[in-house]
Amino acid sequence: MAVRSESVNFTGALGDTLAARIDRPFGPIRGFALFAHCFTCSKDLAAARRIAAGLAERGIAVLRFDFTGLGHSDGEFANTSFASNVEDLVAAADWMRRERRAPVVLIGHSLGGAAVLAAAERIPEAKAVATIGAPADPAHVLHHLGDRIADIERDGEAEVEFAGRRFRVRRAFLDALKDNGLEAMVGRLRRDLMVFHAPLDQVVGIDNATRLFVAAKHPKSFVSLDRADHLLSRPEDAAYVAAVLSGWAERFLPIGPAVDVISAEGEVAVVDAGEGTFPQWVVAAGHRLRADEPVKVGGTDTGPAPYDFLLAALGACTNMTLKMYAARKGWRIDHLETRLTHDRIHAEDCGDCEVREGMVDRIERHISIDGPLDHYQRARLIEIADKCPVHRTLHGPISIVTRAEPKD
């Protein structure tokens, strides 16, 4: 399944604009997941991208974002703490609830794993939580600060270097990591938990996975990431996590589209998808298609819009008609492509319209034909395009009769 990535932003816990991406399938979205990255990392870490893409390929859209002061997000890292990371996650879920759909699954890598565990009870729609190389105690990150901790305690703040980058850390950051009670939170999680951890993790030891697993109530699962490093640097490790995650998440998602309709021969059935205002299922000739509206008009962009289907019908009919005519004439066409657009224009701007007032619908059709054809043959094919059945229907008198079906 193809995947698309959309850039979005929302307001974080400290009032800053946070940068995010939604990785989603081109087809129907079965559910949403929220991904939290590791300490001082970003949403664009290779493992985060690969896991999100892997889930999207299986119908699960993923929102991944940069915490305040990191990546492409606004704000100062020095003003953040573990608590503000948790608040950023809650803000992300609130935005998803308003603008898309609330996350069903929360996923966190390293310190992000600790953050999703702490945030879960404040995201009621989340049915499951997955951690990847997560510490059982957020204070575990303090070892990254080394001897700079004493400077921060003494001076109130200090500049530290981590993974080749420099960050300013304040005492409030240290204080927020102490007495956080994460294991107690895990004990009252009341959500399915999956713990991913590499036995050879040199950053967050495997004992952290043991503590989280023991603290959690059932249902809970543990997955060993054999030979993986902490950042899941190898593509195959991230792909494995995505595959296991998507299989595990199946139980929390709707079982396919709720469409049991079969259309009769020559009939098209359109059934509301039950996912808000616009999404629809189109059942035609045994095929199931998806219709929606783009995000800019309030849709969720999970399928073509109604006018897209109209243009598609005209374009498909055009190409079929031209191929059939060329075959009958013995003319060779190597490549045939028709592109169409729809707009509404003022009648006075239309040179070939019968009406001269108000607005008229205008469809522009651009036909590209490759092959050993002479000028006459090309001109004739363009003439034939206007004779395709859908073209004639759009130009001819149309009677649309609407009847209400009686209730059973």
Image: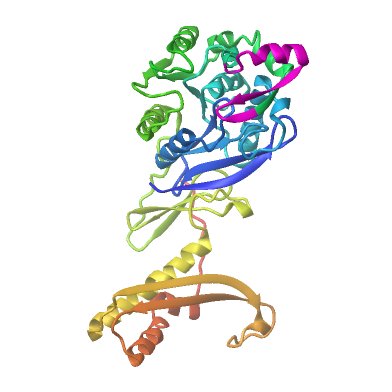
Q: Residue 392: x, y in percent?
A: 44, 80
Question: Where 153 falls versus 407 (above or below)?
Answer: above
In percent of the image, x 56 and y 21: which residue is there? 111
Q: Residue 129: x, y in percent?
A: 50, 23
Q: Residue 119: x, y in percent?
A: 61, 22
Relative placement, left or right, of 200 versus 117 is left
- Say which of 159 and 40 sits in front: 159
Residue closest to the far right? 155
In percent of the image, x 53 and y 75: which residue is there? 363
Q: Residue 33: x, y in percent?
A: 51, 33
Question: Where 227 falls versus 273 (above or below)?
Answer: above
Give yes or no for residue 148 being in the magenta stretch. Answer: yes
Residue closest to the far bottom? 376
Which corner quadrant of the image does residue 28 belong to?
A: top left
Give yes or no for residue 54 being in the magenta stretch. Answer: no
Way the structure is coloured: rainbow
In percent of the image, x 51 and y 35: which residue is there? 45
Specify start and end residues of the magenta stretch as a single range.
Answer: 144-166
Relative placement, left or right, of 194 versus 362 is left
Question: Where 108 falls versus 377 (above or below)?
Answer: above
Q: How many marks?
A: 0
Question: Where 177 falls versus 350 (above or below)?
Answer: above
- Say which of 129 and 328 sits in front: 129
